[in-house]
Image: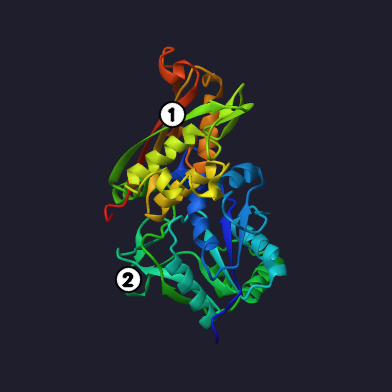
Amino acid sequence: MPRPERNAAILVAAGRGLRAGAGGPKQYREIGGQTVIFRAMQAFCRHPDVFAVQPVVNPDDAAVFDAAVSELHYQPPTHGGATRQASVHAGLEALAAEKPDIVLIHDAARPFVTPGVISRAIDAAGRTGAAVPTIPVTDTIKQVGETGDVEATPERAKLRVAQTPQAFRFDVILDAHRRAARDGRSDFTDDAALAEWAGLTVATFEGDLANMKLTTPEDFIREEARLAAQLGDIRIGTGYDVHAFGDGDHLMLCGVRVPHTRGFLAHSDGDVGLHALVDAILGALADGDIGSHFPPSDPQWKGAASDKFLKYAIDRVTARGGRIANLEVTMICERPKIGPLRDVMRARIAEITGVSISRVAVKATTSERLGFTGREEGIAATASATIRLPWSE
């Protein structure tokens, strides 16, 4: 059978995750500087062999879902049901009009799925029609009765731990879910069990030990520590920028349009805060400076919005497997007053970079009427960036 070309994925994210403790639904909590659901979804949204990703969410989570995955491309979310099985069924029905060949069903609480596992799922479902990733059981398993006494010791060599994404021919698994709904069966804990009930033979393929499900508070603590250990190369960079005033009626400062009696004399929009921040990030990467990546002599950058430069610098960090730990900007000027705009600027930098606002600082000071900033001839900014890179760097 040729490898299927129309492969879709369902991300099941409608649960409440109560066993994970306080802090809201676990799929929207951060781990390693990114939300769990973003980590889970991006692997499918960016996989070259997946043409559609269908999220299934709780209607109460619409706003937090949109904020968590805004930079990804996916199908309009559909609402989940009272059980995981009902949520998967809703996702399948939402995808029916797209007519995929294969569907991969994945739990949003498994944020460490890799492109390799996704590719193996597509291949396995293309060969067999129904397949699940598994890993060997390494501990001895005991079957116990209601009294807690051991009733049996299953043969460990035949046992496997099932993971997701579980992969099926779309029409077959949709039909199985519809049959289960008609028969009032809602007790299946995964789609493989439902497929077995429907008479399908379910194959297995190689899973991944790291593709674990986050269930308890201890899971979050352990995985946060694992990610931190991987990103143990801590780098700090600093940046500085200055622009003189010219004609105009506003200034761009930290990505925010600020009304003012003057404008900036600059090749781009003159945003000294973002320019300093870009230099700080590039400095932490030992990757040149803003002028080497965006030379003022290049006409394409004339009047350019500086958020483009900052997004570029963030992408350079991501491309090297790193993440931002902290960003800090200090504005040096007499006017405009930065204090009332501080949190707006923090929020804008967080939006541009995809970093939590709790990791962004904006400060301001004057030069006590000394120098060019004291004479209100322009504005200066300093910045620092702390990033974490893999030790392999």
Q: CA distance from mark 1 to mark 2?
A: 63 Å
Q: In the displayed structure, would residue 275 be above or below residue 77?
A: above
In this rendering, the label closer to the viewer, 1 or 2: 1
Q: Residue at x 52, y 20 (%)?
A: 339
Q: Residue 78 appears in which quarter of the rendering?
A: bottom right
Q: Residue at x 41, y 51 (%)?
A: 316
- Name which of mark 1 and mark 2 comes first in the sequence: 2
Hey, which residue is sitting farthest top in the picture?
Answer: 368
Q: Residue at x 41, y 60 (%)?
A: 211
Whether residue 183 is visible to the viewer of this picture, yes or no, is no
**Camera-side residue: 86 or 222?**
222
To which residue does mark 1 refer?
381
Question: Residue 156 got which mark?
Answer: 2
- Which amino acid is tagged 1? Ala
- Secondary structure, mark 2, is helix
Q: Residue at x 48, y 64 (%)?
A: 164
Hey, which residue is sitting farthest front in the picture?
Answer: 297
User: Where is residue 259 shown, x and y percent of the image?
Assistant: 63, 25
